[in-house]
Image: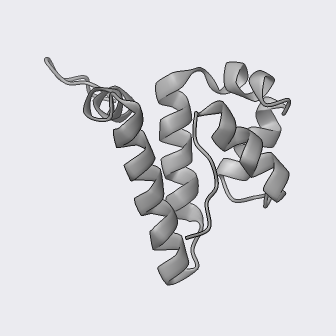
Amino acid sequence: MTEYKNSISMNDAFCITFDNQEDLKEYLSYAFEQYLEDGDFNVFYRALELVIKSRDTMQGFADKVDLSKMGLYNIIKGKKEPKITTLAKILKELGLTLKVA
């Protein structure tokens, strides 16, 4: 892979762009709304992955929510659908909640 001078990774760019709780909340809300419109959870899971990586390592975050790293990746990659309680734990650790509006 070619490395370019003065370039940063997508994850680093995300962390710079969405550097506060309100921005992260809006980003995840938008991704969830996209799921509600088209039924494809992949956009939401990718957004969730970026938010988690902006806060911690995947292993560190998985430990905090009492999941294995592989279990967390299986959820994010859409290989496993999480229980509502698991999703609630993930969101709670991010300082967010589920809300019916």
- For residue 74, say whether it is visible: no
Q: Residue, x 58% and y 42% (percent of image)?
A: 96
Position of 42 with respect to 25 (left or right) is right
Where is residue 65? Give x, y as percent. 78, 31
Judging depth in this view, the residue of 21 and 46 nearest the camera is 21
Q: Quadrant for the C terminus, please.
A: bottom right
Q: Residue, x 56% and y 63% (percent of image)?
A: 42
Where is residue 67? Give x, y as percent. 84, 33
- For residue 89, say whether it is visible: yes
Q: Residue, x 52% and y 51% (percent of image)?
A: 46
Position of 75 with respect to 52 (left or right) is right
Q: Dividing the picture into quarters, in which one does residue 11 lie?
A: top left
Judging depth in this view, the residue of 88 and 59 nearest the camera is 88
Q: Quadrant for the N terminus, please.
A: top left
Q: Dividing the picture into quarters, in which one does residue 13 lie?
A: top left
Picture layout, residue 44 above or below residue 15? below
For the rendered model, the colour scheme is: one colour
Q: Residue furthest bottom?
A: 38
Position of 50 with respect to 64 (left or right) is left
Q: Residue, x 64% and y 42% (percent of image)?
A: 91
Where is residue 47? Give x, y as percent. 48, 49
Judging depth in this view, the residue of 97 and 81 nearest the camera is 97
Q: Residue furthest left?
A: 6
Where is residue 66? Give x, y as percent. 85, 29
Position of 95 with respect to 37 (left or right) is right
